[in-house]
Image (spheres, helix red, strand yellow):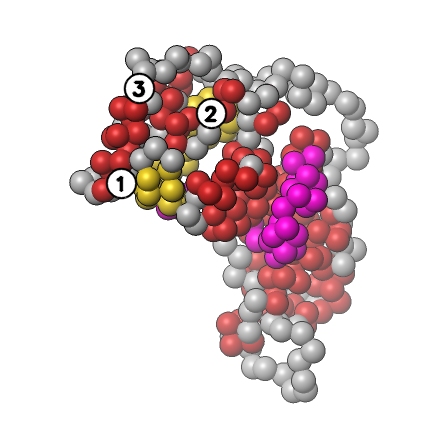
Amino acid sequence: MERNAELGDFLRTRRARMSPADAGVAPGGGVRRVPGLRREEVAYVAGVSTDYYTRLEQGRHPNVSEAVLDAVARALRLDDDERGHLFDLARPRTTRPRRHRVERVQRVRPEVHQMLDFLNGVSPAFVANHRQDVLAANQLARALITDWDKLPYRERNFARYVLLDPGARELYLNWREVAETVVADLRLEAGRHPDDARLNELIGEAVVKVPEFGSWWDSHRVAQCVHGTQRFQHPVVGEITLHHETLVFPADPGQTVCVYTAEPGSASAQALALLASWSAPENTAAPEPAEADPGAA
């Protein structure tokens, strides 16, 4: 990706969503040719010159300070994810020549596998990395979403499933909402890992194959898939609404666990219990734990 263009597009979309009233400045005279704040208004609120901000938006200020980026983030009212994304795009990258290296295989600790097994009777749960590669999943998660273990290594990816598998549009009643959040997470991680070949391949494939992807990507929305509600039309138990929380592993950088729960006493809780009974290990052969592709680059 061209970092200067990414930075400029991101800043333009962020100021386009704000009005002078949002920023606490008086609207200037004349007709506004574009929606949102003008560059000089962002510069005024951030406490920098218009020329300085213009050069930043055009990617012509490689040594911008943290203080200025903080000021711009406050002026544009960026949330934590957006602020982090701004820093990822604006900070100069290392000038050391890049060498091709084989990515270290990401393994899930035995204790985490035990946790997934413990949750299996009550909560679907899976472990993923920054690309949303599914590294491990309990039986209930595989029964709820898809059986990751039966897929080739490179296809064991939550974002790939949601965006590219036709079955996902039938499974998720709120597919558009789920998909848009997935794209926002991919956009965030692309800023953090611009040289991740596998991530860039996934994004490129989605651009070509998912009609809605282009407009979502061009919105420059960034967000982590940390929590939310997903509604399913499951082929076995019917309609079910679940809340999901994503938790980090301090001892395993880059790995998170997504855990689904149902409202106690609800019809969804009953449906989830039925699904757990239907997918219990004594009723199905237990697959081997999933790992990342040993040949990933």
Task: Specify whether residue 214 is painted magenta.
Answer: yes
Of pointers 3 and 1, the one earlier in the residue sequence:
1
**Image: 51 above or below 197:** below
Q: Position of residue 290 (x, y in %)?
A: 50, 18
Of pointers 1 and 2, the one earlier in the residue sequence:
2
What amino acid does circle 2 point to? Asp
Residue situated in front as seen by the camera: 211 or 214: 211
What amino acid does circle 3 point to? Ala
Q: Do the residues labelled 3 and 2 touch (CB within 8 Å)?
A: no
Tag 2, which secondary structure? Answer: loop
Instruction: Say which quadrant the N terminus sits in.
Output: top right
Of pointers 3 and 2, the one earlier in the residue sequence:
2
Residue at 56% from the left image edge and 81% from the top image edge: 26
Q: Mark 1 points at which residue?
A: 268
- Magenta stretch in the rendered image: 201-229
Q: Position of residue 125 (x, y in %)?
A: 38, 28
Q: Where is residue 17 in the image (x, y as percent from the top left)?
A: 57, 67
Binning the other alpha carbons within 10 Å of mark 2 as few (below 14), some (14 to 19) or many (20 upward) gives: some
Q: How far apart are marks 3 and 1 (CA)?
A: 18 Å
**Image: 104 above or below 246:** above
Q: Name the residue under label 3.
A: 280
Residue at 76% from the left image edge and 59% from the top image edge: 58
What amino acid does circle 1 point to? Ser
Q: Distance between the residues labelled 3 and 2?
A: 14 Å
Task: Specify whether residue 184 is painted magenta.
Answer: no
Picture quadrant where residue 100 is located: top right
Q: Residue furthest front?
A: 235
Residue situated in front as seen by the camera: 244 or 213: 213
